[in-house]
Image (cartoon, rainbow, N blue to C red):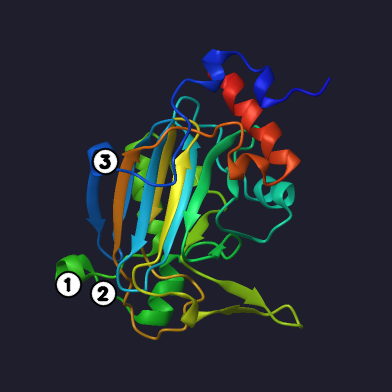
Amino acid sequence: MSITFADLPALARDAVPEASAKFSPELVLWDESLPGGCHWSGLLRRGNTLRVTDLQGTANVATLFFNQEEKTERYNMPDTLKAQHTAYLTQGHVCYSDMGRVLCSITEDTCGWHDTFSGVLDTPHMIRKYGEARYQQHRNSMHRSGLDGLVVELNKWGLGRRDLNANVNLFSKVVADASGKLGFVTEHRQPGQYVDLRFEMNVLVLLSAAPHPLDPNPSYAPGSVQLTAWRSGTAGATDPCRLSCPENDRGFINTERWFL
């Protein structure tokens, strides 16, 4: 039997108001900056949106998502890409969990391409590329790898290195040539670009703002980002992310059943 959004009980459909693409200052929950090379984690509840803004046009943000209530459920890159017939993420796409639920939706995106398959910069790669700059000598100007940043944040929530999985790299565009070689598109990033992530579940979000592993810049110079969260509501019956493909409608239904 085919089930549509309209078939769901009001409790699931109307837990929070339908989302709006814009937000008013009075809806803002918090606003803070994340310096380049640093890391952050926190809980984004169902019906909240997080805007990540690339301040200098040089940012890469390695991102992971977990179901806060059951952390064994987390972002699944293969299902996210094959369900939406894409190799990258942008406005209208969603991020699926390994249980077929929608963790978050991309409701606005002025960047247009977020890398999904290049992974995260690890410490040996970072040292080979940029040299070593330890905290004891360089303090807050130390070199931090994206992997180390994510592991630090995982540990804060009772998770660890074994919980690492394929991440999203916000603001980074990677393309393949005719031979299959991957290349980083430097000119894709511009100052002030932002992406809005609307959370359809209560999601533990991990961010690490270290350089992308394929960034050709020979210097360690990761860009800073601004983080702004506000109360937005969730996807209604005519939401573009829900309607972008039949698979997404089913994913939203799976999500809404979680909250029945």
Q: Label 3: which residue?
A: 28
Of residues 29 and 157, the one nearer the viewer is 29
Please tell me how crowded label 3 is: few (under 14), some (14-19), or many (20+) other residues with Cα within 10 Å. Answer: some
**Can you name the residue that lies furthest to the bottom here?**
218
Of residues 24 and 106, the one nearer the viewer is 24
Q: Label 1: which residue?
A: 138
Q: Residue 78 carries which label?
A: none
Of residues 159 and 36, the one nearer the viewer is 36
Rendered view: 218 above or below 191: below
Point out the tag, 2 or 3, that comes first from the N-terminus. Answer: 3
Assign a secondary structure to mark 3: strand
Please identify the quadrant where the C terminus is shown. top right
**1 or 3: mark nearer the eye:** 3
Rendered view: 125 above or below 24: below
Please tell me how crowded label 2 is: few (under 14), some (14-19), or many (20+) other residues with Cα within 10 Å. Answer: some
* Amino acid marked by disc 1: His
Q: Distance between the residues labelled 2 and 3?
A: 37 Å
Is residue 188 left or right of 141 when viewed as pictured? right
Q: Residue 133 carries which label?
A: 2
Marks 3 and 1: in contact by CB < 8 Å? no
Point out the tag, 1 or 3, that comes first from the N-terminus. Answer: 3
